[in-house]
Amino acid sequence: MDIVDVAFAIADTVMSVGGMIAKAVPTHRQCNIEIENNSRNYTLQNPRMYTRRGRCSKPLPPTIGQSSSGEVEFKKTPNMACGSIGIFTYDLVDNDTTAASEQIAVLFKVPFDHNRKSNKYAVGVFDMGKTCRDLFQDMSKKMDTVFVRGKAKDNGLSYRGEHVTIIATMSDCHTPVIKVEVRDTDANM
């Protein structure tokens, strides 16, 4: 056996082992988010998003009215060793005045390697002046009183704002689902 045959045999073995590992390790990363508007006073409008990693494969509905819901799906970038990470916002539009003075934000982080890093999420209510990119930075790194952040393996999140309360849960798996409920704060009393 000459050196070329040995090199081909090694390459064939490496490719075979690599293929087995690829089949055994789940690499499909996506995050499905369901948002339900149970507010009598506010409509969710004008969705915006920022994705740090991955892409939006199923967009948010433009409006989520009273007693309605919507879904969005974010997926990892194909053929990349990264997860799906981003944020989206909705304006809180007062049903009486049709004005928006605040926005809700939902952050999600679904890592590529679920064994090394945890799924994380955050929810909060912010002034209208913040962009999605700025909110992403703030909600990822800072501690603040206008949002709550947690890991999927922990308990659900609850953020109580002046006008609305946001409750959220996240499943702890490779393709998690986040469920978000928006309700009037006065309904929680």
Image: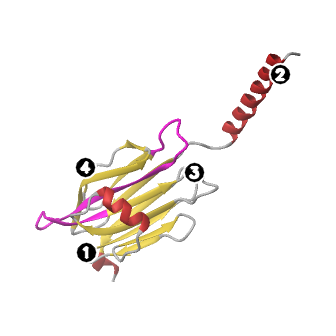
* Residue 80 in magenta stretch: yes
Mark found first going from the N terminus, 1 or 4? 4
Amino acid type indicated by mark 1:
His
**Residue at mark 3 to residue at mark 2: CA–CA distance:** 38 Å
**Residue at mark 2 to residue at mark 1: CA–CA distance:** 70 Å
Which span is picked out in magenta?
A: 75-104
From this view, report whether residue 82 is shown above or below residue 37.
Answer: above
Q: Is residue 131 left or right of residue 119?
A: left
Q: Nearer the viewer, residue 77 or 178?
A: 77
Q: Residue furthest front?
A: 3
SS of the residue at dot 1? loop
Q: Nearer the viewer, residue 11 or 39?
A: 11
Q: Position of residue 89 (x, y in %)?
A: 30, 58
**Residue at mark 2 to residue at mark 4: CA–CA distance:** 60 Å
Q: Position of residue 130 (x, y in %)?
A: 25, 62
Q: Please name which of the two marks, 3 or 1, marks the residue nearer to the observer.
A: 3
Residue 163 numbered mark, or none = 1
Q: Is residue 5 left or right of residue 28?
A: right
Mark found first going from the N terminus, 3 or 1? 1
SS of the residue at dot 4? loop
- Residue that badge 2 annotates: 6
Q: Quadrant of residue 27?
A: top right
SS of the residue at dot 2? helix
Quick one: label 3, few (<14), some, or many (20+) residues within 10 Å?
Answer: many
Q: Residue furthest left?
A: 97
- Residue that badge 4 annotates: 62
Amino acid type indicated by mark 3:
His
Q: Quadrant of residue 105?
A: bottom left
SS of the residue at dot 3? loop
Q: Position of residue 124 (x, y in %)?
A: 35, 68
